[in-house]
Image (tube, grey):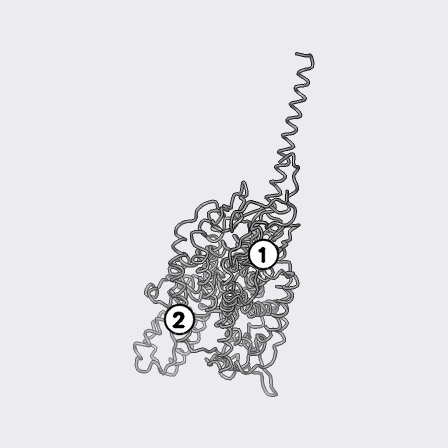
Amino acid sequence: MPKNSKVVKRELDDEVIESVKDLLSNEDSSDDAFKKSELMVDDQEEKDVDVEEGSDVEDERPAWNSKLQYILAQVGFSVGLGNVWRFPYLCQKNGGGAYLVPYLILLLIIGIPLFFLELAVGQRIRRGSIGVWNYISPKLGGIGFASCVVCFFVALYYNVIIGWSLFYFSQSFQHPLPWDQCPLNKNASHTFVEPECEKSSATTYYWYREALNISSSLSESGGLNWKMTICLLAAWVMVCLAMIKGIQSSGKIMYFSSLFPYVVLLCFLIRGLLLNGSVDGIRHMFTPKLEIMLEPKVWREAATQVFFALGLGFGGVIAFSSYNKRDNNCHFDAVLVSFINFFTSVLATLVVFAVLGFKANIINEKCVIQNSEKILKLLKMGNLSQDMIPHHINFSSITAEDYNLVYDIIQKVKEEEFDSLGLKSCQIEDELNKAVQGTGLAFIAFTEAMTHFPASPFWSVMFFLMLVNLGLGSMFGTIEGIITPIVDTFKVRKEILTVICCLVAFFIGLIFVQRSGNYFVTMFDDYSATLPLLIVVILENVAVIRIYGIDKFMEDLKDMLGFSPSQYYYYMWKYVSPFVLTCLLVASIVQMGLSPPGYNAWIEDTAMEEFHSYPTWAMIVCISLMVLAILPVPIVFMVRRCNLIDDSSGSLASVSYKRGRIIKEPVNLEGDNTSLIHGKSPSEVPSPNFGKNIYRKQTGSPTLDTAPNGRYGIGYLMADMPDMPESDL
């Protein structure tokens, strides 16, 4: 062997290695280009082009900065004002602690499964509510439009409540609080208490007269309330600024708006537990009345509360979820957010009953003092004998127990004359049994209790700032349920759409800041959302389970989650949830039919609420709200069914990806059924004919199984793949 033969052999080996490296390098680059340019082409009717994970278009969609930010957004949306002023009322009304049993059962039956369903479809399809349901079946695309309409209706009046909270917040920086005492009127001869306030209470008077300046009926407009108009404008400006950049701006605000209410609730709970009478309120809440659990009304109200507490059907859940990665564990999110929502409701109920127990104790003490003075007068007048009063009773420092002992003795001895004596039974339970909800709880009962707190302005500022944050968290999800679907569908600029949406909503919302505006809030709250949302969620369930296919959906979940979800969800989605939702819809219609349509009007002369029936024009408005909310569903169905709009979704189109933009080009399919890709291609040789679906599987895909005619009925091809040298092929 020559002397340098080893050197020559080494050089030849190096050349071979370099050639192999070049080949592998080119192969990798083409594979990368392939991964970055997946697309699906399908000629099935009513199927939209979906951009799969890894494409440039997919990368353009905004994403959450962190999982915590996303969870806080979902919690902020689902945890709203209803958790503070609706759930405690239902708990008080429907058996105390026993109400938690049907609530938990229905949370497991309809709450978590349907919440999981909305999270999953949003994350899988990565579109807003319009795009999601249009993807599943264009004939059901109206579901997304209906969700947008309902979101808009709810946003109109929900932001008015935030405006009310802003007004009270602004008035809380003074001591004493302006609703602490009844105002005094002066005339030429003497000073007297405002009659309307004297007949009701200081907080009630301040709410109806100072804040709302309310009229006596729905038909009596009374003009705009300028104070509330300014507060409404401020509320819409806050929402607009927070939402103008989508989740890029609102996501950062979530850290404060979602967490601050918990800080306030915990502070109120600790403070409330130190107040006299708070234990009585909490005991009253948790004392179960098991017999009430058997009433159908309790289960209907529990189901309704579960339904609305999680924000089902609004589109906000789908919109937020659409900004997630496809492999996010949305099952964990659904369970976590649902139980955070439940425990928040329980925490808020503890706070409310602790404070109401304190308030009831104060009212009870006043009752004891007033009636003890009556007994002393009756003793002096001789109407009562001193002998019937136990010797240990001291009326100058009488306790509630001693007073009730004296009351029972007098009632037994003076049985026939007792009613004429004018004595009242002073029981804390009687005061706690007075069910208060909604604005009556937040702006009257709770506000009155806080006037008795030490440093009451501080607690008032904290409470109304909490209400503002709770409202804003829900508003962000509601507006996202409007903006995201429209941006995804019509490709408009999010900033411009957000500003226009908020401006239009503000000007329409002026009807809620008239003197009669509170009655319109009640009307919209009762009729604009309840039935339409139930119908929307029933159709969502049908669309996924029946039209898309529950087996396909379960396989999709397995691909996304990396594990098969429990068969529990299979049976819930397929059988139990649709049945329960249908029963709830029928029960709601029956309840609406049996309850006379009307509202509680505040009468200034009597300083009391009085039930008024809606006039004819108001009934037309109520019916119109329900019809308009659900009207997009049949309209879109008929348009798609009758092909009234020229839609290219049913024909093959070529899609090429370039710098995050989708370019659709019509293809002449007369010649070659598979010449679908325009742009850079390795050669002009037509691709092999695979039939209707064109398929090329992505290698190494962790989440997608793209067999032809399989789960998605779609396939993948390369677009914009760099030309490869012939020597490497």
Q: Residues within 10 Å of mark 1 (few under 14, many from 20)?
A: many
**Chain-order first, disc 2 or disc 1:** 1
Where disc 2 sits, the SS reads helix
Residue 430, numbered label = 2
Side (left or right) of 45 relative to 591: right
Residue located 64% across and 58% down the image? 245
Left or right, 351 with respect to 423, comes to: right
Disc 2, disc 1: CB below 8 Å?
Answer: no
Which of 40 and 74 lies nearest the eye of the viewer? 40
The N terminus appears in which quarter of the rendering? top right
Estimate the spatial distance between the alpha carbons at disc 2 and disc 1, rounded to whole Å: 40 Å
Image mark for residue 254: 1
Amino acid type at circle 2 is: Asp
Picture coordinates of residue 91, whole percent (x, y): 41, 64
Q: Position of residue 29 (x, y in %)?
A: 63, 39
- The mark closer to the camera, 2 or 1, is 1
Would residue 265 appear left or right of 572 to someone viewing this image? Answer: right
Q: Quadrant of the C terminus?
A: top right
Up the image or down, 602 lies above or below 428; here it is below
Mark 2, Cα crowd under 10 Å, few <14 / some 14-19 / many 20+, is few
Q: Which residue is the extreme one toward the front?
A: 671
Number of marks in the image? 2
Between residue 655 and residue 423, name the one nearer to us: 655
Q: Is residue 472 at all visible to an observer of this figure?
A: no
Mark yes or no: residue 630 visible: yes
What amino acid is labelled 1 in the image? Met
Where's residue 355, x and y in %?
48, 64
Q: Quadrant of residue 181?
A: bottom right
Q: In which quadrant of the rendered view does residue 251 lie? A: bottom right
Question: Where's residue 173, x and y in %?
Answer: 62, 67
Q: Is residue 218 left or right of residue 244?
A: left
Residue 727 or 88: which is nearer the viewer? 727
